[in-house]
Image (cartoon, grey):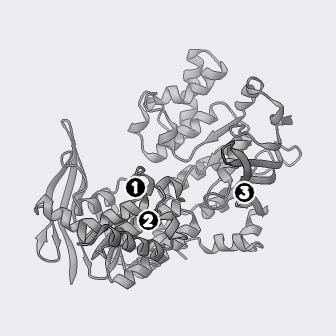
Amino acid sequence: MPLISIEHLSLGFKLGDQFRQVVDDTSFSIAEGEVLALVGESGSGKSVTSLSILRLLDSPPLVFMDGRIIWNKKEDLLTVSDQRMRELRGQDIGVIFQEPMTSLNPLHTVGRQLSEMVLLHELVTKAEALRISLEWMVKVGIREADKKISAFPHQLSGGERQRIMIAMALVNRPKLLIADEPTTALDVTVQRQILDLLMELQREIGMSVLFITHDLAVVKGIAHRVIVMEQGKIVETAETQKLFAAPSHPYTRKLLAARPRQSLSDVDRKILLLKVEQLRVWFPIKRGVFKRTVDHIKAVDDVSLELYPGETLGVVGESGSGKSTLARAVLKLEPSNGKIIFDQTELQQLDRKKLRPLRRSLQVVFQDPYGSLSPRMSVAEIISEGLDIHGIGSVSEREQQVIAVMKEVGLDPESRFRYPNEFSGGQRQRIAIARVLILKPKLIILDEPTSSLDRTVQVQVLELLQALQKEYQLSYLFISHDLEVVRAISHRVIVMNQGVVVEQGDTDTVFSEPRHPYTRNLIASIPTMD
């Protein structure tokens, strides 16, 4: 029997005089106890469809054009009162959002936020609500839950925050759980733990799950059925095993085929471009009235590495392993001890003025292109900013260089006067790459450059990086928790855990014959479609 049925749903957004339809005549149902995966790229309409169940999007600008959402064969959720929707939210329908840091209130402890969910829907005392909250923190695998119940969200790791979100969604034992990209930003090991936890709790409670994701590999082992959406329409629905074995729609086949392919450039090993020796980044722990240093957090501890022209060195490890701190130290954005020799120059001895000319050859592409691009600057201004800072070329020469580099990264030069918010995630990442490429650097540090992108866009960006490396003999320090991506683009890999390099070597050797238990655990956690 269907727990919820979506019938001929059509949705759109009205912005001023403009109207854009995002969901077109969509119908599906979820049975009691069923796990249904809703899959598609960004802009396919999957999140809008799911959030419309709870009426969480402001209307306007959202316009419900047509259709019904029938709950438990009794109520149309699009027409019930606001009071009834408040009763259903959290009580009968729980939701896990993609980014827990923006979904949790930074001013309240996680214990208070969990207790609030209980108090809203259950007739219990505050003490009883706190006890139930603690039980659920233990249930979702929070270590030292009795201590962390009084912690604020920023004091927890990404995996712990996501577990808190799961606890908040399930604390009232809902009949339906909507999980909107709940593992996208997590390490592979944490992702595996979260998926296992969700499925264990699903079986225990007997609830239905609507699992929304752009990554088909994630859903293979958890979903009973899969729905594939493209541009607001359902293009394929099938049982999970059947869909993976014999996809019928070209778009589904495209999603399944969107996997990074290894295509490595030749490496010139005559002269080292970057040599790091016994690099340390230790943060002091100070206590007492006089704030004496009693210990250190060893974010990076005696790390050594080498990088040659035209080579990609992958840096992998879970959140908190020291990957990004290592990158900031190499860029001289984080104070450190040890040697950093770039292009035969010792960087540790240079002050800011002497370091500036070298920054042209040492560039960085960040994880979130939208956060790293100024919303107040046009694309042309963003890409040419480095030329302005280093005083390279005249105004007309800079414009020609912007046009040339935009063509090189696959962007239309005619769009150079537009702003970042007018571009897709993949296009914004291409803008970020163009911004560093225009300076003709020798080394680019790529800090999680594809983790927030759809698989198909991710593959396009990786192919672009590989093509640019071959053409310009670029070197990459590629930091990622996505091991499949690292394997495709890296010549060599170093594996970090708690600030220490636990394993390093040729990429194929590390992946096929990992020696360290930590590396073996990382590789075993990779979602696979095979």
| Camera-nearest residue between 153 and 130 | 130
Earlier residue among tags 1 and 2 = 1
Quadrant including the N terminus: bottom left
Q: In the image, is 187 to the left or to the right of 179? A: right
Q: Taking 90 as reference, is 327 above or below it?
A: above
State the mark number for residue 104.
Answer: 1
State the mark number for residue 499.
Answer: 3
Quadrant including the C terminus: bottom right
Q: Residues within 10 Å of mark 1 (few under 14, many from 20)?
A: many
Earlier residue among tags 3 and 1 = 1
Disc 3 and disc 2: Cα gap in Å? 26 Å
Q: Taking 373 as reference, is 124 above or below it?
A: below
State the mark number for residue 164.
Answer: 2
Where residue 490 sits in the image (x, y, percent)? Answer: 70, 57
Earlier residue among tags 3 and 2 = 2
Q: Looking at the image, is mark 3 or mark 1 nearer the viewer?
A: 1
How many marks are shown on the rendered structure? 3
**Amino acid type indicated by mark 2:** Ile
